[in-house]
Structures are given as structure tokens and as C-alpha cells.
Amino acid sequence: MKCRKCSAKAVINMRQHKLALCKSHYLDWIPEQTQRFIDKYKMFTHDDNILVAVSGGKDSLALWDILVRLGYRTAGLYIGLGIDGGISYSDESQRLAKKFAQSCNLHLISVGFPEEYGSTIPEIAKLTMRGRGKPCSVCGMSRRHIMNRVAREEEFDVLVTGHNLDDEAAVLFGNTINWQGGYLLRQQPVLEANHPGLVKKAKPLCRFYEREMAAYTILRDIEYVYDECPYSVGAKSIYYKELLNKLETDRPGAKLNFYLSFLRAKKEGLFSSSTDQKPMELNTCNNCGQPTSVPGECAFCRMLVSIAD
Amino acid sequence: MKCRKCSAKAVINMRQHKLALCKSHYLDWIPEQTQRFIDKYKMFTHDDNILVAVSGGKDSLALWDILVRLGYRTAGLYIGLGIDGGISYSDESQRLAKKFAQSCNLHLISVGFPEEYGSTIPEIAKLTMRGRGKPCSVCGMSRRHIMNRVAREEEFDVLVTGHNLDDEAAVLFGNTINWQGGYLLRQQPVLEANHPGLVKKAKPLCRFYEREMAAYTILRDIEYVYDECPYSVGAKSIYYKELLNKLETDRPGAKLNFYLSFLRAKKEGLFSSSTDQKPMELNTCNNCGQPTSVPGECAFCRMLVSIAD
């Protein structure tokens, strides 16, 4: 198969776009498209200070690389969770995040959860039995808390994450299969800071397939953690991704169409926002000042108190 | 496995309800549940005259049987479409619909499409090239037209169809995967007659799994057309059913939850009805007086004119 732009040998064929590209044109096309999405969804501008949540995986490193190539002012944030895999999953993730930052001469902020809070995420999950002892819910909550805290403390304008189309489509599928109105209303490429303690969030890669990000990272020679988090085995999101992959194989473009038609329907006013289904009102945590759905202390602060007892 | 109610041998285990029942209790349970759905969704009462759309398949015959057992005033409507299968699919369907009506001493209205309109449905599809010559869209439109016409002419209060949960979930899945707002707003167990030319429609079996209806029909010794319509091969609805069956196998109850959580979210006001997405306004066909989305003649009348030319 040949590149649509120059007839050189194509390295990737994107069936949903009927577009095959060579290495050189593909590595141009990805940042061009990203810029288009950033503008379309009004994510941020070249005047903004952007904090990139970096896990050491392909998506977040690709995102950082793309934003740097597009000339944005960025710093990275790595959060060490204390998760062991075959070799230590967290150690390896941190090593690769640091390696990338150093090679590009970029500023990486590191927060070590065990160092700051005295326990690893899996230890806290066992102590509190949140999520029945499985660390995923503690991990998600803690990362959201820390990302928001660092973004505010360091006065970043926007926090960006490397969620790709496969991630977004899987979340959307899970919310749709159970018709969770609140989550459907909240799922967006951009979440505005609708509370003084909340930073604006954006997902510039939300329209790229996971395989496109993998190809980009490999072609850019960026070393990344290939393994999934050891705790993700059996996760619903992975199950939904498999189901959507089946749909995509049978009908190329189905995944993208699912996500984009959702955004379109939402924009055209499919959902009511003046009903029982409207997003929850946010309160301010008495302890840390971050937003919380319940009055008093936020779930993160309550968790820290419970493990200190 | 034993019956939950009497400890006799169970004939069916409904995992989503954690309920196993023997033949006798199952055959009581189905009409009880149907009555519950009829009341819950305000489908009709014992004062209403009910027209049952009967295809000769398991669902429509089961529906008619259940309504008769529940003491409702019913007549059946069979529409002959002129579709050939191994043996003639339409002939066999009609034979079994008639056989059931006679055995229960019920009134069956028969409309033969080829006899009334001069051509079979597949012939019309080829002539008009609607649906690229595949008869499904012509068939759906023609059946809807005739069902509504007969229901109005014979002064029935409500038209009922045998759509089961698998049908409804597949339609919902198709509308969701493409976020077709108009269709999502319209999908209901009951469609009120919101136009003078339109009869009220209801789907009393919409919460029963297809296998539950198959079991009911077999246990009631009702002979039905086992084959699917020969034109349904490769239909999207069948593809979606397979996908939902996979989901159901992995997570019993997923299909029911998908449909019921949709109805619940809708009732709680998830969808906006005052926007671009609102259901289309209906006009009256100049020729037949039935409702039509475009002013002038309805699609059915236009189709008849086009084949008469």
C-alpha cells in the first residue's frame, strides 16, 4: 500500500479515513490533526501553561511529544503509585517518563504517592477496602486529586491527559449500556473549570485510535511502558474495548462514529440539562479546598484520615 | 434445577431474574408479567379493542395467546407479503397464523399484498429500487401502512406487535451506536396516537427475552414459523443481536438492564424534547389520509404510483 500524499511505502492504513500514509507524512499528519482538535474543542492556546499527565505509557508520551512539536508551553506530571508488576510497574513507568523529559529537555514534576502519603496505592486499597480492596478506584481518585492539586499549586491553565478514542469510546459504551445520565452529560473532550478549585481539563488525543498512537510512538522512537497496569486485568473498560474492537473490525469507523455522533447529538441538544440528570453541584473540601460532591471533606481527605487512624 | 415455586423440575432458568420455573408455573408467570407490563406502561384496558399483528412467528402468536388468556378483546391481522423461502415463507406463515386463529376460535383479518396491490413486496423492491432492491425497507413501510390502515378502518383502539426484548435492545443498540436522537426519543413500549390518522401502538412483550418467548410457544404447543425471513440474512439487527448476546452471556441481565435503564433515564428527563432533536411533526397524506412526515402524499402512496406508471 502506498502513501496517499507521496506514493512512498505506507506505514499505516487508517480504514476509517480511507487514508494510508508513509512514515514522514504520518508523523506530520498526527500533530496537524491534534492542532485541529485543540482548536475545534477550544482546548487551549499558545498563551496557556499546560500540564501533561504522564504515565510513561504510549498515549501520554505521544501527547507530550506532539504538544512540544506544536510549540506549546508544557511541563509533565508523573505520579508514582507504588504498583508492582513483573518488574516494578511504577519504577519502570517513572524511568521512561524521566528519560523522555530529559531527552527533550522538558520539566517533569514527580509526585511519589508512597513518599508523600506513607503508603502505596495497593496498600491503601487493602487498608480501606475501597473497591473491595482492588486499587483501581483509590488509584483513580488519588490521581485526579493530585493532578488537580499540582495544576492549581503550580498555576497551570489546563491539565491534559492522553485518553485516546479507544478509551473514550469504552467509557461512553459503559455509560451508555447502563444509561448513566450524569456521566453522559459530563463526557467531553474538554471539561471547563466550573468550580474555583478545579482546573480545566482537555483530551487532545480523543479522536485518535489506540493503534494510531502506538504507531506514532514507535515511529518517533519513544520508549514507553508496553505492559498494562497489572491491576487492569478483567477491568470492564478492557471488556468494552474488546467488544468495540469487534464492531470496528466488522464495520471500520464504527468506534469513531459512535464517539463523534455522540458529541454531535449532544451539541445539537439531545440531552436535557435542566432535569434530574444535570451534573452534580460541587462543594469545597474543608481540608484541602478542592472540589467535592459532598459537603465537608472530600473523599481523598477522608481516605487519608481513615488510614492515619 | 428445581422450580422456585413448587420444587418440581424446572423447564427454564432465567438468570437475569435468578428465577427457575416448572412448566406449569412458567405458563402462569408469563401472562402475569405481561399484565404487569400492560398496566405499568398504560398500554390498554379490557374495554379496548385490540388488533394483534400476527406474522406466524413465535412472538406474535405467543402475544395473541397471552392476551386471549388474559381475557382481552382481540382480533389478529395477517399481512401476506409474497415472500418465497425454501417452501414459500409467506404461505407457511399464513397457514400457521390461520391454524392458531381457528384452533382458538379467533377472528383473523388477512390482507394479501400481491392480491390488493398487484405485486409482491420483493417485486416492488426491485421495481422501485428502494433499499437498493432489497425488500426490507419496502416491507417495513408497507406493513406499517397496512397495519395502521386496518386498525383505523376496523376501529381498533390499539395495535399490538410481538416485539420482544431482543428486538427492542437491538433497535436501541443501533440507534445508540449512531446516536440517532429522533429514534431514541421515539422508542417506547407505547406509542400514543399523536395524529388523528394514527392508531396507538403497544409492545406488551418488550421485556421478555426471545428465548422466553420461544419456550412459552413451545410449552403451549403453538406451531409457529421457525425460519427467519429469507431476506433477513446479514441484517444489521441480527448483527446487533449477536453482539448483545455476547454481552448477555458474559453478564446475565445486561440486555434487560440496557433497555430498562434507557427507559428509566428517559422518564427521568435525560433527553431534551424542546430542541432540534424533537420527533418530527406529522402531516396528513392527500391520498390516503394517513400520517406522513413530508407534506403531500405519503411514501406508501408515492410508491404505489411509481409502480403503476
Image: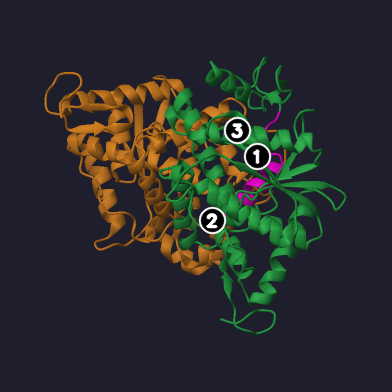
Chain colours: A green, B orange
Give the residue number, with chain letter if any, for mark 1.
A111
Question: Which residue in the rendered view is the most extreme toward the left?
Answer: B8
Give the residue number, with chain letter if any, for mark 2.
A225
Q: In the shown orientation, is residue B31 left or right of residue A268?
A: left
> Which of the image's four quarters has the N terminus of chain B?
top left
Instruction: Return the residue nearer the eye: B10 or A137.
Output: A137
Q: Amino acid at mark 3?
A: Ser
Q: Amino acid at mark 2?
A: Val
Residue interval drawn in magenta: A254-273
> For numbered disc 1, what is the local secondary structure?
strand
- Parent chain of label 2: A
Instruction: Return the residue nearer the eye: A31 or A52.
Output: A52
Specify which label sits upstream in the sequence, 3 or 1.
1
Give the residue number, with chain letter if any, for mark 3.
A142
Which quarter of the picture shows residue A63?
bottom right
Estimate the spatial distance between the alpha carbons at disc 1 and disc 2, rounded to whole Å.
18 Å
